[in-house]
Amino acid sequence: MPTVVEARNLVKKYGDFVAVNGIDFQIREGEAFALLGPNGAGKTSTLRMMGCVSPVSGGSLHVLGQDVMRAPRGVKARLGVVPQRENLDPDLTVRRNLEVYARYFDIPRSLVQTRVREVLDLFHLQDRERSPIASLSEGMKRRLLIARGLINQPSLLILDEPTTGLDPQARLLVWQKLSYLQSQGTTFVLSTHNMDEATQLCNRLIIMHLGKILAEGAPAELVRKHVGKEVTEFRLFPDEKPAFIEKLKQAGLGGASLEVGDNLYLFDAHPETLGSLSHHARQTVHRQATLEDVFLKLTGRSLEE
Amino acid sequence: MNWPSRRAVRVWQRDRDVFFRMWKAEFIPYFVEPLVILAALGLGLGGFIGLVGQQNYLQFLTPGVVVAYAMFTATFECTYGSYIRMEMQRTFDAIIATPLSIEDVITGEIMWAATRSLMTSVAIILVALLFNVVPFPTVVLVPVAALLVGLMFGSMGMFFTSLAPSISSFNYYFTLFITPIYFFSGVFFPLSSLPPVFQRISEFIPLAPAVDLSRGLFYGEWHPRLMLDLAFILALTVAFFLASLVTMRRRLIK
């Protein structure tokens, strides 16, 4: 599979602040790729550099085979960008938004009508084509933003937190559409702090934290590698914690556990080895490991560090 | 700074489409305001003034009002208008995600502001004709002068917009800059009637040469000084246009 994005030792600085601190990654054609991480991880900065709207401070970044700093117009002509903050043109109707946007790409008029029809249908907006933007729900606006991003049939779709702020139904609809697009061969990269979103939509991801990449791989593979199959979560009151930690250490499980706030996580511990530990916690949950645990493990601190 | 490209036209088209979509809201003020000013000042106040040189006051007033409103139109468009599109609607962000650069956006915005100045000037000239102001055929060049005034004040406004910390900053721009310009550029009285010190100062007021030029074209009074006026306008336009490209890139591309 050809490489669509290639970042090498990529750096983004704003004055003295380092937002992206020398990261390397590749996105290949046909992939659904996620940048996963909390706010401030450097996800948006990375996406903005890919979109050629934020200069690269160090290292190199090639998108669709071209250097983003040298050929921004050529790159942007083949990108679809869905921003985190809605920026539809409020002075224009739904349909005119798409038509005017198509004109920025020099799409021939004869083609524009077909494309507009296609994306309106795909995102269930055909009944709203004459509506002003202000009359749309948040979910519709987000769908229109994605529709707009597809108007030039991009080789790479960049989505910055595509479902943040949406209610569950609207989010589900966006997820379904993105899954559909992926099945049709669209390559996309999205940023999210929603682990579920990354797990469901993406076949490969990087976990970012404070401008660095902590881990890279397929969601299931990352879970298996870093936390195993299952997790035991002890929910404690603050005053119970010290005594509980003592018991944990006595049981020889200190090394495999992780402290996050008042909770303790034990990865892939056999229920038998836990013995009577769970009686000492306010609540004990034994469940399947998820990406969230990977993230907590990689960013949190172990008891024996 | 990068040079703007032909794609700036796409931004001009966007602004044009929005304008004509809302033409009912946009068009009426075009005719009403000049109508009011020509009637109140030209006919009303003019009755007390008598002749300015060889002209009655309405005749004297009209060419200046044309370019003064060209100034206002372009200034509003590139201050409040551009600021709202840039900061509130984030239209600029949306556009620079496409093959257009920020320089294309700024250029298109200023081009559209100047186009509006041209439309304003035509409207005022038509209203003046209703008032029996009789121009010389070179009046057809006055809208071209208004277009240049639009480019000049559009660029100036855009430069200020690139530095404006908030939308209320424009109050300063209007009260400290545009309003004094309006009153001291020879629109309402000949600058020669000011004390010599003020006359010297008024030579550097950006609208003054435009008023001079407009008056010359309106009544076909050719004078070599008009070439100087033109050169002044062009020089100021180029300087502020380039400055606004630099400062806008600095503001928006981080």
Image (cartoon, coloured by chain):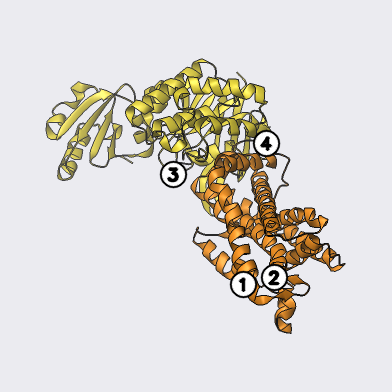
x then y, percent, for residue B111: 69, 48
x then y, percent, for residue A269: 26, 25
Classed neighbour count for the residue bearing mark 4: other residues with Cα under 10 Å, few (<14), some (14–19), many (≥20): some
Give the CA separation, mark 1 to mark 3: 63 Å
- Disc nearest the viewer among 3 and 2: 2
Instruction: Give the residue type that dot 2 points to.
Output: Tyr
Task: Report the front residue among A88 and A24.
Answer: A88
Q: Which mark is residue A270?
A: none
Task: Report the front residue among B171 and B166.
Answer: B171
Contact (Cβ within 8 Å) of mark 1 with mark 4: no
For label 4, the SS is: helix
In the picture of the structure, the residue carrying the numbered disc 1 is B45
Could you confirm whether marks 3 and 2 are on the same chain? Answer: no
In the picture of the structure, the residue carrying the numbered disc 3 is A40
Position of residue A304 in the picture relative to residue B116 (left or right): left
Above/below status of B7 relative to B134: above
Q: Quarter holding the N terminus of chain A?
A: top right
Instruction: Give the residue type that dot 1 points to.
Output: Leu
In the picture of the structure, the residue carrying the numbered disc 4 is A73
Give the CA separation, mark 3 to mark 2: 65 Å
Judging from the image, mark 2 belongs to the subunit labelled B
Contact (Cβ within 8 Å) of mark 2 with mark 1: yes
- Image colour assigned to chain B: orange
Above/below status of B63 relative to A74: below
Task: Report the front residue among B125 and A111.
Answer: B125
- Disc nearest the viewer among 1 and 4: 1
Give the CA separation, mark 4 to mark 2: 54 Å
- Image colour assigned to chain A: yellow
In terms of sequence position, does the residue under pointer 3 or pointer 4 come before the other?
3
